[in-house]
Image (cartoon, rainbow, N blue to C red):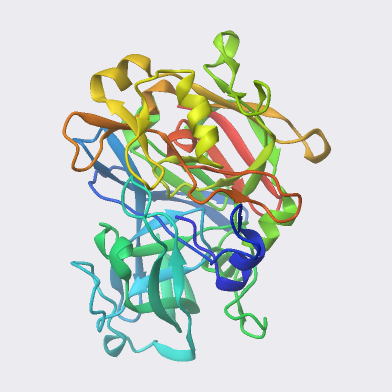
Amino acid sequence: MISLMPLIASLLLTSATASSPSQPFTGHLERGLKHRSSNRRQETGKASLIRVPLEIYSRNNGKTELQWMATITVGTPPQTFKVVLDTGSTALVLPRNNCTDCGKHSLFDPSKSTSFSPQPALFRPIEYGTGADTVPLNQTGRAECEVVTDTVSIQGLSTPKQEFLLCHSYGEALSSQLADGILGIGSNDILAWDESGNFTYLPFLPHLVSEGQLPNRIVGLALGSGGEKQQQRGPEASIGGVDRGRYRGRIKNVNVDETLTNLSGIFMVDVQAAYVGSGNNKRVWHNSTNGNKPLVPGVAIMDSGTAYMLTPDQQTAENLYSGISKDIVPLDDRGSWGASCDTLDKVATDITFTIGTETRGEVIEVTMPKSAFNLGEYPGKKGVCQAALSHWDPPLYEPIEGRPMWLFGSPLIKAYYTVWDAKGSRLGWAEKV
């Protein structure tokens, strides 16, 4: 889920069809569920790494893995909530007990918490650009929230006086998700609630570090289902360090694009090239509108909370699918592509990206496996399945250099053990076990 505050979004995302910054957006979410794991800590000096078990939201009988959810508590005595652990956002977002459109979610009741404070009492609407499924939203969603304060806890660690967003209106995308809320674990340590920058706050993880409860704010994600450790312990997040039992070999670190990452508060990496296939069996993903040359280099939003991938524009998606099968066609006016389920299974292929730059550290290749190519049956279209890559509509370009903007979601991220190192301004990739 991409979750940006209004000022940040206006600085960051621009449309190819607009002369001024686009409207801010946030979002994505999902359904279904599995759960397994342990509640262990690994000592790292005076503070300790914690392992957080994650529940998988899925549909299509588990074929389509959508998002991963952690359990937190808020208030005194504690009220329990399931939240999407989201690298594409930075704030904690929860529904209030007076919410009129929050579905069947658990609602936070301030009157039942002795540690609750309505301060700083700032009205803060949020917007989201991806919703509770694999299908892109047809319009930007919006939730109406206020900034409040209370104690927030996860796996035995607590931050008193944690500021977060408490919403009295969720909007369709948030209300339709299975998770109660969102726990943003984006890259920024200090953020502002308003455009003036006067109301700054510490997001949840930096707050835990500042109080000495975590050694650092590194997050390791072992998502997806598959792999020996995944079967034994289920998907997990390690918070405060790297879990060496969840990967093999070396972690390959790619430095983020610091300018864009600092502007947005979410991890962004440079994209140098894209290929159909992997290893020695890959071919360049050509740009048919530019003399059959390789795609123009761009930048990618790294978002664990979105269940699909996004190309910068429709032409880029068309260039990909025309080289795989003429039967893969647009499914709607929102950017989804697909074909009959049998066809999509037959033509499924790895998709490989070259990310990073020599001037900003290591350059590596990462691959979305062909097992993630078919997202499953498209809602409302029996026998028709959706391909993993949709396209932005309208197209998106970053404002600093005008490069095309991608979104790399869970179909790619869950194939690896990933390490999100905000202080080190890097994103690590390792073979998952």
- Percent position of residue 133, x then y: 31, 48
- Percent position of residue 44, x then y: 60, 50
Q: Residue at x 42, y 72 (%)?
A: 152
Is residue 1 placed above or below 220 in the rendered structure? below
Q: Is residue 269 visible?
A: yes
Q: Is residue 180 visible?
A: no
> Left or right of 265: which side holds 161?
left
Q: Residue at x 25, y 81 (%)?
A: 97
Is residue 165 placed above or below 336 in the rendered structure? below
Query: In this view of the protein, which residue sits in the foreground, 99 or 337?
Result: 337
> Left or right of 351: which side holds 188?
right
- Percent position of residue 281, x then y: 55, 9
The residue furthest right is 359
User: How many marks are shown on the rendered structure?
Assistant: 0
In which quadrant is the C terminus drawn? top left
In which quadrant is the N terminus drawn? bottom left
Query: In this view of the protein, which residue sits in the foreground, 91 or 72?
Result: 91
Q: Residue at x 52, y 58 (%)?
A: 185
Quadrant assignment, res 390: top left
> Left or right of 316: which side holds 304?
left
Quadrant assignment, res 345: top left
> Left or right of 277: which side holds 79?
left
